[in-house]
Image (cartoon, rainbow, N blue to C red):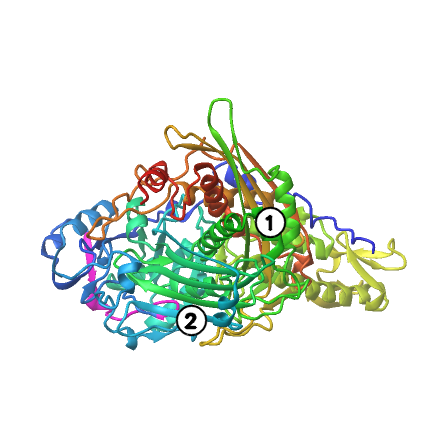
Amino acid sequence: MQKEFRKTVGTAEQRIDAVEKSTGNVKYLGDKLITGMLHAKVATSTEAHARIKSIDTNEAWKVPGVRAIVTGDTFPFPIGPILADRPPIAFDKVRYYGEPVAIIVADYPYQAKQAASKIVVKYEKLPVVNSVEQAFQEDAPIIHEQLGQYTKIIDNVYPVPGTNIASHIKIRKGQFGQAWATCKDTITATYSFNLSDHAAMETRSATVEINPDGRVIVHSTSQSPFTIKKILNQFFNIEVGKVIVHIPMLGGAFGGKGAVQLEPLAYLASSAVGGKLVKLQYEREEDMMTAPCHIGFNATVKLGVNEEGKLLAGQYTFLIEAGAYSDQAAGITRAAALDCTGPYHIPNVWCDSYCMYTNHPYATSFRGYGHPELTFAIERTMDQLAKQLNVDPIEFRLLNAIKPGHSTPTQSVLTENNIGDTAKCMIRAKELIEWNGNQTTVTENGKIRAKGVSLFWKTSTTSTNAQAGAVLLFEPDGTVKLSCAAVEIGQGTKTILAQIAAERLKMNMKDIHVTMEVNTQYNPHQWRTVASSTTFLAGNAVLAAADDAIRQLKKIGAVALQCSENDLEVGNSRVYLRSKPTYGIDIKTICLGYKYPNGHTVGGQIIGTGVHVQRQLTEMDKDTGFGDPGPWWSVGAQAVEIEWDEQNYTYEILKAITVMDGGTIINPMTATQQMRGGIFLGLSIASGESFEFNDKGVIQNPDFRTYQLMRFGEQPKEYIVEFVETPNEDGPFGARGIGEYGVIGAASALANSLSSATKTELNKLPLTPELIWQTREVGQ
């Protein structure tokens, strides 16, 4: 079969924002300063769990420039994206250290900050729930006494009143009990790590202005502009059409800016000063202690195999730390459950995934949406079980790798269309890491080199009606303006959409102009820029818009060329006869309509519109998890080689490999950058990132001096990224989502390599020299 020729798709086109960013000309929201704009700061809780007895604002009002002070009694109602359990400003009680207890509005930021420090809150202290293990105990202090009364925003969240369980998701496939009893070999292991930070370069900020006509103008560093509209409508009773959200380019997000926190606060602040423009911008410490963070995770995994070494049964118990409020952690709890087995065929599955409240900052989406965490647990268990069976870890994975004809934990049937080639990814990663069956060697200077591998998978966990729209507006010179609500957070999505449009219209990339800022007043609806879904949703919408534009061009072209529409083609900025390409007309001549010599005109401006909505997805059954929750599964393999110094327990990461089946790769260079950035992020989380809490639930490392990000020079000495391309016929030109996937298997590959080097099972993150020493020497 002859391969389809493509001009733009599959080409490493330069990112359309490259020049603007590299020259420092991009204007972020933090750069926005307008004369007369007021500034807000939050006063935050100094207790992790306490009842609010009183709030004294007298001294704060004495600070010059203070215009308003807003406390929780102004809006004492809970809000939330999945379960409405969080008041924008704490009311009656506080549930984490750093929770907003008041907003101060002043002329200048320093005045608001000074006033915030003068607010005095009297508390009645309550017992602090400091871990998910403690939260899960029957006698644990209850963090949300009104849990049974909270409003469900979506159906598939299942809180358990009288406990700290915000949601309990079940997967029941096959006959686990019977299968477990027949297993020849079994293993049980437990894994854990703490909450951590998103650490985006740009901190979160928002501005709100309420016009006299009732329009609410929001500028935000958000991945979810239409969710902001929804929240302000649902909980503040503002007409959706009167909420206008602007999103500039973002300085990183990693899922953390998918949450809606600052916008309701800024709205309340603007309301308190008569609708004037108010800006709320977090400093780094606020962004780490008050804003939502990355989930914590505790997992117990049980796997059993038959005589041939094939996985027969798997049981998974996930305690996902949501912190003080459920936010997106409730959705992550579901996402972890529906992919709980990892990319392995296991016919009998039993999974209980719990979203747990604690008295820590609340968690939200993070790149991978629960999959780096569950993959760490699954892949560590696979390595340990392979060791127990005395088989090669890669061969063990290949024996059990999922493939077409198998089914997922929710019993979705997999086909060549909706699942990539897991085995091909693993085999290529094995070649690139130069795996020869011997995972460890000793260097001349006495250091130990070791290799570790990981398989990974993930479906795009969207709502069943998630959708995106796109508009292609033809300018008088024949160029095209592409408008959509995909947010540019650094991933290069606008470049990809321009390539898709250029390919379908058979135009040059330079003739596609993409609006970078999102403006919900003009851009069509898009679900959110999360879940590796933008290329799939917005890309398909762009294709639909291009097809609509082509139909219009052919219709007007047929008039101008006096022929049938069916005889025409569109390409190279022309409409021409298929049988005689030299006979045609330039698009710029007809894109505003065709004008006859006598002045009469037919047609009008070419405006192509397109919408794509998820198809044939279903909700999961409450008791079994049965359903079709995702459109496709992207799969891949990662490998890491390290060099460990037994004398001081430090290590270097020598090589990092990613091989991923992303379907058709639209832009090989941006895709490679995504994978490199992802594995860097995954290795940073694995090697050092974690919030440290004292016994009072207070973060002890709320800044970049003490929070251990991977620094320059600590990254792998060599990155290798390759792609397997198994087309997804439902994706634009066969593409699958790839945005999150580089991060997913990094932690498990690193842990597997270090476990081999140290001859110690390392089942807790982060993998600091101290933790390795404690585990190996002290047994903690």
* Left-right relation of 516 to 593: left
Circle 1 Cα neighbour tier, 10 Å, few/some/many (<14 / 14–19 / ≥20) = many
Q: Is residue 57 left or right of residue 24?
A: left
Pointer 1 residue: 495
| Between 506 and 335, the one nearer to me in the picture | 335
Residue 343 position, x and y percent, is 56, 58
Residue, x 47% and y 71% (percent of image)?
177
Task: Reply above or below: 418 against 749.
Answer: below
Residue 570, placed above or below residue 681: below
Magenta span includes 138: no
Q: Is residue 20 visible?
A: yes
Residue identifier under label 2: 240
Q: Quadrant of residue 141?
A: bottom left
Q: Amino acid at mark 1?
A: Thr
- Magenta stretch in the rendered image: 66-83
Judging depth in this view, the residue of 277 and 679 nearest the camera is 679
Give the image location of residue 309, x and y in percent: 58, 57
For mark 2, give the secondary structure. Answer: helix
